[in-house]
Amino acid sequence: MPSSVASKSQSDRPGLYRPGVDHYASPDRRDAVKQLWEEPVTFSILKAALAQVPGSMSLSVMDIGCGAGEGLHLLRALRATRSLPSLPRLTYRGLDLDESLLQLAARTHHDEDDAQFWHGDIRTDLPDTPFDIYMSCGVPFSHLTAEELRSTLIRLFSTVRRNRTRSIVVIDVLGRYSLEWAPQWKRSRWPYRMSFFRSDERAQEVPMTFWDAHSISTCVRSAAAAADCRIERQQLFDRSVMVGRHTATGDFNPGLPPYRTLINRLEDGEMVPTAQLRAPVVDQSAPEAIRAFFGRFAARWNDVLDAAEAHGKVRTLPPAVAGPMLARGLRAVEHGLASGLGTGHSLSAVITLDERT
Ligand SMILES: C[S@@+](CC[C@H](N)C(=O)[O-])C[C@H]1O[C@@H](n2cnc3c(N)ncnc32)[C@H](O)[C@@H]1O
């Protein structure tokens, strides 16, 4: 069935994502870091959600803040790579405020599965009919204030409770303690700009809310209690500890090396001076768990750099071999240590609700 755009309510930030249309339509968006560092984490999050759904011939998915339909693309990519051969027949609904992204979604996704894109506000327009999975990606929930997220979750959890279903909710938000914005760590909401969009039109500043493991868990628990809904399980994931897109823009932490650019160069077969890749020392006023995490992380990350130097690989091997080899070692540190504290560009909570009995 072709996808369709159904008008439900007016956007209250018209044009916010207009400069992003070229970004979302461009193949350049999928740089090496996105493909090798970020998408594997995204796929782990989706697999964690899918693993909680009871086996069935069909699966209904609501993609909250779907933009140009990245969620549908990811689900199809999972099926195409056969990492999820049993992904059943999909009913997909995307909900978003931004007309320009919804039009791109409708142009991009058609003819496969039962996909529709709806214009509406996630705070008020989530449908009363339940879905197996409420997914989100690209941090749409960070547009909401903490209180708005709580009331949106109460509404969503109440739908699950009323319909007596088992449903999985993926809440994707910006990580409060990303190195990209270390000077802002003291604040949980501040004006953010998606300056990585490559467009002639300058991206607007917009207030966003930043979350860590404690604040998101507290919000989810409070919403579940208000909706009288039982949380069976919560899993947390950090994505992009060292390679968030704002390490390349330098907008919010100008002192940080442009790690994403440097690592893209390594992955693309160039060698870069290892001194530029050293992990930073984080502010000693950060919460203890965050400082401890970055302490462990920096030690392992810098060990990989030291080992590459000590074995002479950096100097003796051709860059086309040494670059990706070093990147693989650093990637293993990132994927091995990230643990859902809110220390990456984004933090995802996978919440399992079971109201069947
Ligand atoms: C960074 S984009 C991510 C889009 C898409 N999920 C992706 O991963 O590419 C965040 C999206 O959240 C949407 N959004 C923000 N606030 C919203 C709201 N209150 N209701 C519906 N959509 C909203 C924006 O329009 C935008 O498309």
Image (tube, grey):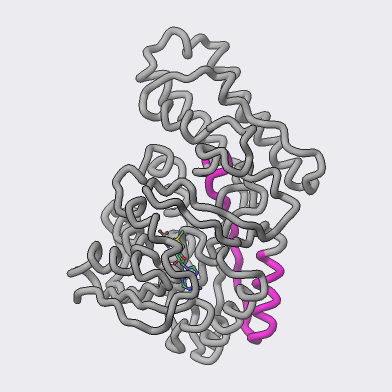
Q: Is residue 62 left or right of residue 304?
A: left
Q: Residue at x 72, y 32 (%)?
A: 281
Where residue 17 sits in the image (x, y, percent)? Answer: 42, 61
- Say which residue appears at 35% left-offset and 75% top-offset: 93
Identify the image quadrant of residue 357.
bottom right
Q: Is residue 57 visible?
A: no
Q: Looking at the picture, tell me which residue is in the foreground, 92 or 284.
A: 284
Where is ligand 1, by quadrant? bottom left
- Residue ranking furthest to the front: 201
Residue located at (62% from left, 49% from top): 339
| Number of numbered labels in the structure image | 0
**Vertical order, 347 against 305 (above or below):** below
Where on the picture, by quarter, is residue 295? Answer: top right
Decide which of 257, 346 is in the foreground and name it: 257
Determine if residue 25 is in view.
yes
Q: Look at the image and give the residue range highlighted in magenta.
A: 216-243
Compared across the picture, whether 106 is left or right of 93 comes to: left
